[in-house]
Every structure is written in structure tokens, then in C-alpha cells.
Amino acid sequence: MSSVPAVSVEQLTRVFRVPGLRRREFTAVSDVSLEVQPGEVYGLIGPNGSGKSTTMKVLLGLLRATSGKCAIFGRDSARVDSREEVGYLPENPYFYKHLTGAETLEFYGKLCGLRGRELRERIGEMLALVDLEESRDRRLGGYSKGMLQRIGLAQAIIHRPRLVVLDEPTAGVDPLGSRQIRDLILELKRRGITVILSSHLLEQVQEVCDRIGIIFRGRMLREGSLAQITEVGNRSEIVLEGMTPELMEEIRALAAARGAKWIHDGHPRTTLETLFLEVTSAAAEAARASAGKS
Amino acid sequence: METAAPIRRHRSFSFGRVWTIATGTLTQLVRMKVFAFMAIFAVVLIGASFAFADLKTEQELKMLKDVSFAAIQLFCMLFAIAGTAMLIPRDVEDRTLYTILCKPVSRLEYLLGKLGGMVLVLVISLGAMDLLFTGVLHLKQRTVVEQNVAELEYRPFRSQEEREKAVAEIIEVATQQGASWNLQAGMAAILAKSIVLTAVTLLVSTFATSTLFTIMVSLALMVIGHAQGLAREVLLDEADGAVLPRLVAGGVAVLFPDFKTFDVLDAVITGTVVPGVEVLKMGGLCGIYCVLYMLAAWVLFADKEL
Ligand SMILES: Nc1ncnc2c1ncn2[C@@H]1O[C@H](COP(=O)(O)OP(=O)(O)O)[C@@H](O)[C@H]1O
Ligand SMILES: [Mg+2]
């Protein structure tokens, strides 16, 4: 691969004027630098108001930087043509309510220069990818939040961008929907598309991101690969099925004999999210199966 | 591999993108059922065609034209202002603008697309009203002629010749006051005015803080546009050739739209023929105003923080 990073943000600072009588200023992003290599999935995490969206908007040229530089595949973000290679899903987006799913994709596809058969095929492909084929002729006014996010993702990638920027893609979406979005992100990654996403939900970021940056009050606190950031180096975990008290004793004894320290044992818990997903997806599967029979 | 972005050379200005935004805007307005006001227009028109039935031939047709042109003009101009005022604020509020501007779309293309969409809507609605109006006027003209000719039966004529002359006179008056190409000059004037108002409203909405503000300012500009020609005449007459008042008046005419050139409706209604040069002049002036206001809008919008 070439050495040009997909995204490079260098010492980005963004100051907002706070409207009012006194000319107060507010620094939303302060001296943030980050780099994303092609093919990586990068997660920007931090609580609300920490400057994630602002960073992304500057990256996309929707806001100007007060100081610092942003580039996409080496092209300055302020240039309109840097947007050829990028797809963006803003935070809580609303698309034109009066358009159907297919018309929405057609509109954005045309803006990206797609026409004719290529455009039609691409619309079909995208609707299939985000699993909205059945709703293609329904107006967006009647879409659920999860469906809107998925159509938003589809419009973001309709022109085959090499970089996709997703601002809180799962905010306000139920667990099943957010699982679908997670799978889509993994699919993008499989296809070699670079993804940068923001979230305040840590588990989700953990599931999909190669590298993460923790941003808080406009400052980058920590950055690195997921393994680097979360690994506890000198500990290990074993999960077994069919454990008997005798086997447990043997392992304990062996560990003690080899000089390892026993920290913790117990039954792994299903997280509520996993349980919820298991139950609902089983039900969905069953419904689909019975629908297929009749 | 599916992912490889096809090499597409970016063109810094593309009519395709402007057209996409324009037709998108047209669809938006159509699906907001803006053409419903056409039903109101139809009622006004049909009401007017019955209301003045007991006037003289000439008067009857004139009144019908008077009422119809007034209604068409009012609809088009109010629609140009109210329709345009909501376009940009709506996109900003819904963050739809982000999804558009993060595509390779320049802000100028976006603005021109919005203008184009409104022009399409205006052309379609004005065209429909024009058709309806011309049809009704044509029918009215025929009934008026028939009625008047029928009334001649009760008038004693000395000769057949005299009778034929009277019939010819009726037909001439009716033709002069009836449906004609000259009326289309009036339609052109209304279209030109409405397009100028659209451009001005778009300009205002790039710096306005609310839709209501945009509508109020644009309405005020509409009034100024109609009044400034008159005001200028009076003032310059008093100033009697002084340079400064002339410059000021010229400046005002550039900053605020001046609708004096588009003032042909009265002439058209009385049946005075508007020369083709005048129509060309209206088109040219409309173009100049659009370019001016769109450039200003671009300057303001290009720097706008979203
Ligand atoms: N246009 C603006 N004007 C003033 N302050 C803003 C503006 N946009 C964002 N901010 C402020 O900048 C901070 C960071 O916002 P944002 O980037 O949206 O955070 P996040 O996406 O991480 O939740 C917030 O405190 C927010 O109030
Ligand atoms: Mg945010």
C-alpha cells in the first residue's frame, strides 16, 4: 500500500465564538492529532461534548479549523474534490422525508456523478447490503431510527468511497439494529474500506475497531491499537465447558506447582446485551422460517 | 475488487449536480403539495368569469384579465418568497445539508440547484395557470361575441352592410381584448419578477437567523421593488439633474430589486402591444439580478459555518 494515510489530522484546534454580548470563546477541540492508515477501523471515543463531531466536521470540510490541518488521502479537507473519496453519516441525520429509500440513494448517487445503469445497479446493491430491499419504495418519513441509520450508511458508501466517516452510527438504535450496523462496519472493513467512527458506547467500539483514540474535553488523552490500550499483559483467561470439581482441583494444584497466582474463578456471565440479542434473533429466525413455509 | 474507487475526474462545476439538486427541490415542493394553491386559483378564475357578466364587452373581458393577472402575480410572488425561504433552513435543521455538502458538491452548485428548483416550480405553476386562464378567456371571448351578435337581432339596421359592420366591430373589440400573444408578455413579466424575488430570498436566507425573518425581509424588498421606480421619478424630478441623488438612486436600484421594467401588466390588460424588445429587456434584467444576488449569496454562504 502507499504510505499516504487515509486520514491525517495534525494539531487540530477549533475555537467557537459563543454568541452573546460578551465575546466569549470556547475551545471545542484542542491540539488533536491522529492518523488512520488505509484499511483500518478507527474509533473515536469520548463522552458527549468532547469534540468528536467537531473533529469529524473539520475533517470533512464542513467546518474550518482554527489552526492545524486535516487531509483525506493526502488532499486538504477544505478542497471540494477531497470529498470524492469519502462517505459521511452525520450524527442524528434526517434525510428528505418525502423521498423513498431508493429515491434517496438515487439522489445521493447522482450527486456523486453516478448515472444510468451503474446507478441503478448500485442502488440495488446498497439496498441489499443494508437489508432495506423490502422498504425501497416506502418514504423515509415512515422509517424507524435504525432503518434511517442504515439508509444513511448506504448513501454514504454509494459512490464506493475509500473512507467512511460515521458519527455515532448506533446512537438511538436498539441493540438488534446496532448489531446490524456493527456487522455492516465489519463488512466494510472486509472490503478494505477505511472507517472512522465515533461513539460513547465503549463495548461497540471494542468490537469493531483496530485502533482507538480517547478524546475528552477536546483533548486526545490516549491513542493506540485496541490490544495496546486494553491488554493486561501478565494475566490470562481460560473458559471451559464440562468442568468438574476434581479437574478444578488439578488445575489449581498445577498452577500452584508452577508458581502462578490464582486470581479469580467463576462462571462467565452472559451480558444482558448478548442475552437480548440471542433471544430476539432466535425469534426473528423462527418467524422467518414459518413465513417461508406458508 | 468491489472497493476500488473508480477513477473519476472531479469537475469543479457540474450542471449534472445542479440539475440533481434542482429536480430534488422540485420533487420536495411537489410532494409538499404546493400545487394545491392552483385549486384556489381555478376558483378565483371561474368566479371572475361569471362575476362581470353584465358589463360591456370590452369591460367584461378586461375585468377578467385584471382579476386573473392580479391573482397569478400574487400567487407567484408570495410563493417565490414563502417557498424559497424554507429551503435552506430546513436542510440545515435536518442536517441534510451536511450529507449533501460532504459529497463532492460545491456550495455554489447547491445554491444554484435550489434556485433552479424554484424556477422549475414557478415555470410549471405559472404555465398551468396561464393555460387555464387563456382557456377561460378564450371561451369567454366566444360567448361574449355570440351574445352581442345575438343582441343585434333586436336592433334595426338600415342595410345589411351596416349590420355587418357592427358585427365586425364586436369581433374586433373582442379579439383585441381576448386571448392573444401579447398577454404572454405579461406572464413573462410575472415570471421574471418571481425569479428575481426567489434569488433575493435565497440571498436573505443565507444570512437570516430564522425563516420568519427571511419572509419579512423579502416581503419588504418586494414592496421596495414596486415602489422605488416611482419614488425615484419623484425625487429625481425635484433634484433636477443633481449627480448625487442620481448615484444614490442607481445604487438603490442595484442593491434592491427594481421592478419598474417589469411593469407591463396594465398595458397588457388594456390591450396595448408590448414590443418584443421590452420582453428581451425584462429577461436580461432578470438575468443580471439573478447573477448579482447569487454571487452575493455565494460569498455569504461559502463562509457560513454550518
Ligand atoms: N457551532 C457551535 N458553536 C458553539 N459551540 C459548539 C458548536 N458546535 C459544537 N460546540 C461545542 O463544542 C463542544 C464539542 O461538541 P461536539 O464536537 O459536538 O461533541 P461530541 O460530538 O463529542 O459530543 C460541545 O461543548 C459543544 O457545545
Ligand atoms: Mg457528537
Image (cartoon, grey):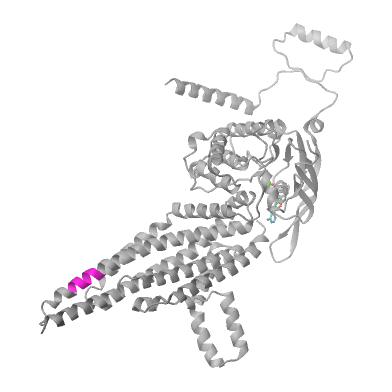
- Give the image location of residue A42, x and y in percent: 74, 38
Magenta portion: prevailing SS class: helix
- Give the image location of residue B285, x and y in percent: 53, 73
- Based on the displayed image, in which of its 4 quarters is residue B211 positioned? bottom right
Is B146 contained in the magenta span?
Answer: yes
Q: Residue at x 38, y 79 (%)?
A: B267
A293 w.r.t. B95: above or below: above
Q: Is residue A63 left or right of residue A148?
A: right
Name the residue nearer the viewer: A73 or B280. B280
- Residue A94 appears in the rendering: no
Q: Is residue B159 left or right of residue A28?
A: left
Name the image quarter holding the C terminus of chain B: bottom right
Q: Which residues are magenta?
A: B141-147
- Based on the displayed image, in which of its 4 quarters is residue B65 positioned? bottom left
Name the residue nearer the viewer: A17 or B128. B128
Q: Residue at x 60, y 54 (%)?
A: B14
Name the residue nearer the viewer: B159 or B233. B159
Q: Is residue B245 left or right of residue A230?
A: left
- Give the image location of residue B129, x and y in percent: 37, 63
